[in-house]
Image (spheres, helix red, strand yellow):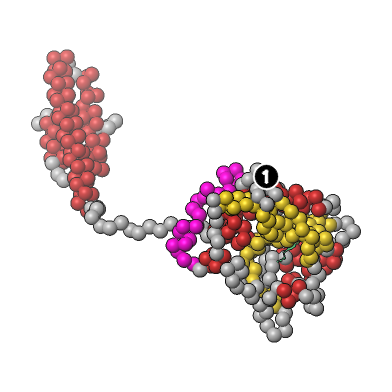
Amino acid sequence: MSNIKKIKDEYLDKLNNELSLESVNQIRTELFGKNGVVSNEFKKLSSIHSEERKKFASELNFIKEEFQQIISKKIQYIEIKEINSKLENEKVDITLPERSFNQGKIHPVSQVIDEISSIFSEIGFSVEEGPDVENEHNNFTALNTPSNHPARDMHDTFYLDNDKEFLLRTHTSPVQVRTMLKGKPPFKIIAPGRTYRSDSDQTHAPMFHQVEGLHIDKEINMGNLKGCLNYFIKEFFEVDKIKMRFRPSHFPFTEPSAEVDIGYEIKDEKIIIGEGDKWLEILGCGMVHPNVLKNVKVDPKKYQGYAFGIGIDRLAMLKYGINDLRAFFETDYRWLNHHGFDPLDVPSSYRGLSR
Ligand code: DAH
């Protein structure tokens, strides 16, 4: 039996079996690889007499083509079989109802805190935090509000023990104390967070939010305070000009102290910030009292600066046209869906603060 016939019989036999893709490829290499049996037959061609060579070459080419056809059919068959078995086993039932998908919303208060942090970080303020449970020293005494001071009564404090040593902080001002005690001047921080007072009606909730600001350095004056607040209010309300009024006031921890009003008017039942002749109080501020600086071991002869405290909920209501403060804290999902913000819509001064 000629060699070619032997190869043909042996490999036709092999290819007749049920084969995997790997085995087919293996057979292909055995036949046509560098040292494949057919390749080796081709190498013999040069040493054969010319009359026989022609016949041998055409036989060789014939079986080469035959095998190639069989192999490519075999591969096609295996691939189709694989696809069919996938179709059989990985059926998707398109009549099933879809899985429910809920995208949450960012609460307007969280959104406004992000907006405020973004605005102040543009002018060099960093963000500090303090605990909701404070001691009376940080909340009052260190802030120049001794125990007999009438301001303590005005704060309607939730005390946590009979000795009145621990309380729910009534404002974010104790973060001033914590920040200055743990570092060295200069200080330039804001501190947003929850605050508590025993008070509740349409415009007051027992839990509400404030943001504290503090800037202490060697040459800080009231002009800096005014410039900073002016910038903040314009950025926050996204308007080019605002009307702002400093009204003399009193806080134990600042001297002089002021309350700041912004001008507004109502047009078509909408509030327009920066125009009109109505005034709205939005924050308290002043130059940090020397006693406060002494209490936190900062020399008031070398350092001074300003502080301010802003009611966050009030700002959120104004900016987003929400007229009942209590809705903020009722956890009504329909309300939140309507007034909430897209989680991917992170406020920044570059991309815009709000939609
Ligand atoms: N802590 C004050 C309050 O809750 C607000 C305030 C006023 C904060 C003046 C300040 C400030 O830092 O300088 O009523």
- 126 with respect to 101 (left or right): right
Secondary structure mostly seen in the magenta stretch: loop
- 182 with respect to 7 (left or right): right
Q: Residue 293 is drawn in which quadrant?
A: bottom right
Judged from the image, the secondary structure of the residue bearing numbered disc 1 is loop
Q: Residue 205 is drawn in which quadrant?
A: bottom right
Instruction: Give percent across and percent down for residue 201.
Output: 59, 71
Residue in the picture at 28% in, 58% down:
97
Write down which quadrant ligand 1 falls in. Answer: bottom right
Which quarter of the rendered picture does the N terminus lie within?
top left
Residue in the picture at 65% in, 62% down:
311
Residue in the picture at 23% in, 49% down:
86
Instruction: Give percent across and percent down for residue 121.
Output: 67, 50
Assess whether residue 262 is covered by the magenta stretch: no
Instruction: Give percent across and percent down for residue 161.
Output: 68, 83
Q: Amino acid at mark 1?
A: Lys
Q: Is mark 1 within 8 Å of ligand 1?
A: no
Per the rendered image, the range of residues in magenta is 331-355
Q: Nearer the viewer, residue 58 or 323?
A: 323
Instruction: Give percent across and percent down for residue 273.
Output: 63, 50
Q: Which residue is mark 1?
A: 241
